[in-house]
């Protein structure tokens, strides 16, 4: 069975979690967390590196011990060290870490104080009111834990878009290798660029005698065949991801692609338009009576009901049909529209590459400018910069800009917003910067009114440029902060500052609806990589997908502007 980067990253993340539950050395824990991020974000196929006997120590932060473990995982599908850790803690305790607000330290406390080892035990002690009696917890946190456990137990497994992409790419390559296959396309929520994916819909056109269905059900990552027939099949992969295959005739390809892309609400609305014209739309085509009048392309399907083609990211029945009828569909932003990136980190804090290496990688990604925005001093675990170290980096950027060609580095910081709304560094050093990204990295659970006041106060700071990952959420790990986002967006308009759309796949923060709200208020959004390595600029594509779902055009994006215009907009 092929091992994906996400599989290796998951092993290292679990090792880090279990080590933290055991109160292991913090530096050892951090090494595994960094390794998980490096491998998970790598644009190269790590399994292919092992097969090609490449030196894994080329990957940032991967030494001999971690390289050996990667080879072990790829070659055996297992990790002896992880198996050993599983033997040292209760077998299901790692599941508790999937509950928002329960990090390894809190899991360890509940394990030792109340004997909590499973999700069901956690739900029981929370329901009995016993968690509030444990030091460090209270009635409010107990209720949040109970709600989070019940929500977790009721929902189906979902995969981030980045992880789903790995499975799509590998499966699509496998299907394309089958005899007689012409086109392979992933439809469904994946094509609409939803931030998480519950299952995959794969669409194929192939010759009548093609063995593509057998190739699909025989794929070596398949754990269970749920259904199989000549034109459709359904399987569950060993990762738990369900994948449905449809084999369609070329003349029905566009109709099938449209139908299986969805969303359901969008399709229902378009079918209503078709019915008004005496037409019927299904996965085989557009029909007037028994005659197929369209279906070979998506464009023909839309044209049949009097609409221009609507980009997949907009197909959520949120006004796109009315906009299409009135000729007001947005010209959605593309990756090629980005001129720069306003959020990245280097080895000076928790990044893995040098200033120059990050600059050259940004240039290779087609960018013209890059803001270096290290963490500020409060984030000690990330070795955040104090005023003195930041001043030294400012001087280093000036020296490097003197010799760089084709890329300009901007001086910046990702400064913590403190609990009282103040920024984590003095004005004297902030005044020397081109970009100040202000972010929440602590006190995530403040009540909405207090959290909103905190952010509004930070936005009023004269050097504030951009709100970084505004709701501070982490998908399937941490719920968004309780914020009055409409008020924050209005305040950003009044202040003339921007909001970030963070492209890290586990963040994708702003959500699409707040992107659209920012657009409507005239607030510029910056689509940033939050890169921690030279490979992370590839994550900008995920931010672009989210921006497109939020109806953003290039004119709505701060870092789609040329450098001179950017400087004018941010006051430098």
Image: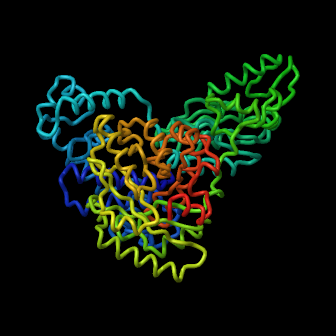
Classify residue 201 as left or right of residue 111. Answer: right
Horizontal and vertical percent position of residue 443:
27, 45
Residue 513, relative to residue 543: is it above or below? Answer: above
Q: Is residue 391 left or right of residue 39?
A: left
Q: Would you say residue 371 is visible in this rendering?
A: yes
Splitting the image into 4 quarters, where does residue 387 fall? bottom left
* Residue found at x 13% / y 34%: 114
Is residue 502 shown above or below 370?
above
Scheme of image coloration: rainbow
Quadrant position of residue 482: top left
| Image location (x, y in percent) of residue 159 | 48, 41
Q: Residue 230: percent from the left, percent from the top?
A: 70, 32
Relative image position of residue 547 (x, y in whole percent): 57, 45
Residue 399 or 245: which is nearer the viewer?
399
Name the residue at 50% across, 71% down.
Answer: 409
**Residue drawn at point x = 38 percent, y = 59 percent:** 414
Measured along the vertical axis of the image, is residue 272 above or below residue 419?
above
Query: Which residue occupies the foreground of this view, 378 or 364?
Result: 378
Q: Residue at coordinates 18% horizontally, 44% vertically from top-left?
A: 108
- Between residue 142 and residue 15, name the one nearer to us: 142
Badge count: 0
Mark yes or no: residue 76 visible.
no
């Amino acid at each position: 069975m092929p091992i994906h980067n996400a599989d290796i990253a998951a092993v290292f993340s679990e090792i880090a979690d279990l080590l933290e539950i055991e109160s292991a050395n913090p530096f050892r824990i951090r090494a595994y967390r960094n390794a998980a991020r490096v491998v998970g974000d790598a644009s190269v196929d790590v399994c292919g590196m092992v097969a090609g006997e490449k030196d894994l120590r080329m990957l940032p932060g991967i030494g001999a011990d971690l390289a050996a473990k990667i080879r072990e995982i790829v070659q055996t599908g297992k990790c002896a060290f992880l198996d050993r850790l599983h033997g040292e803690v209760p077998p299901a305790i790692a599941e508790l870490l999937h509950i928002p607000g329960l990090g390894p330290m809190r899991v360890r406390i509940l394990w030792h104080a109340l004997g909590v080892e499973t999700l069901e035990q956690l739900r029981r002690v929370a329901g009995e009111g016993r968690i509030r009696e444990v030091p460090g917890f209270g009635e409010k946190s107990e209720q949040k834990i109970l709600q989070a456990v019940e929500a977790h137990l009721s929902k189906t497994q979902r995969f981030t878009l980045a992880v789903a992409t790995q499975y799509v790419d590998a499966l699509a390559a496998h299907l394309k290798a089958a005899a007689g296959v012409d086109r392979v396309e992933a439809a469904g929520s994946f094509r609409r660029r939803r931030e998480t994916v519950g299952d995959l819909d794969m669409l194929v056109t192939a010759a009548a005698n093609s063995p593509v269905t057998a190739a699909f059900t025989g794929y070596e990552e398949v754990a269970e065949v749920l259904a199989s027939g000549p034109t459709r099949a359904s399987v569950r992969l060993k990762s738990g991801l369900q994948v449905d295959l449809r084999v369609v005739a070329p003349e029905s390809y566009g109709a099938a692609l449209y139908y299986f892309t969805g969303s359901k609400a969008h399709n229902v609305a378009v079918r209503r338009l078709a019915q008004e014209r005496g037409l019927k739309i299904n996965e085989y085509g557009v029909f007037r009576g028994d005659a197929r009048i369209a279906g070979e392309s998506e464009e023909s399907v839309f044209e049949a009901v009097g609409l221009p083609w609507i980009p997949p990211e907009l197909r959520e029945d949120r006004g796109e049909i009315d906009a299409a009828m009135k000729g007001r569909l947005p010209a959605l932003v593309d990756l090629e529209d980005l001129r720069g990136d306003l959020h990245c980190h280097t080895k000076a804090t928790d990044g893995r590459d040098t200033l120059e290496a990050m600059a050259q990688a940004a240039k290779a990604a087609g960018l013209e400018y890059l803001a270096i925005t290290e963490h500020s001093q409060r984030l000690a675990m990330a070795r955040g910069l104090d005023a003195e170290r930041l001043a030294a980096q400012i001087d280093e950027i000036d020296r490097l800009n003197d010799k760089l060609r084709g890329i300009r580095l901007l001086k910046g910081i990702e400064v913590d917003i403190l609990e009282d709304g103040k920024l984590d560094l003095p004005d004297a050093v902030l005044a020397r910067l081109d970009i100040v990204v202000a972010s929440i990295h602590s006190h995530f659970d403040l009540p909405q009114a207090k959290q909103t006041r905190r952010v509004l106060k930070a936005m009023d700071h004269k050097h504030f440029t951009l709100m970084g990952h505004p709701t501070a959420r982490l998908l399937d790990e941490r719920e968004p902060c309780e914020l009055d986002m409409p008020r924050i967006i209005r305040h950003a308009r009044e202040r003339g500052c921007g909001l970030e759309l963070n492209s890290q796949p586990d963040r994708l923060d702003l959500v699409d609806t707040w992107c659209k709200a920012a657009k409507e208020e005239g607030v510029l959004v910056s689509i940033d990589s939050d890169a921690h390595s030279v490979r992370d600029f590839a994550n900008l594509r995920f931010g672009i997908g989210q921006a497109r779902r939020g109806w953003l055009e290039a004119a709505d994006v701060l870092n789609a502007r040329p450098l001179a215009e950017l400087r004018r907009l941010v006051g430098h």
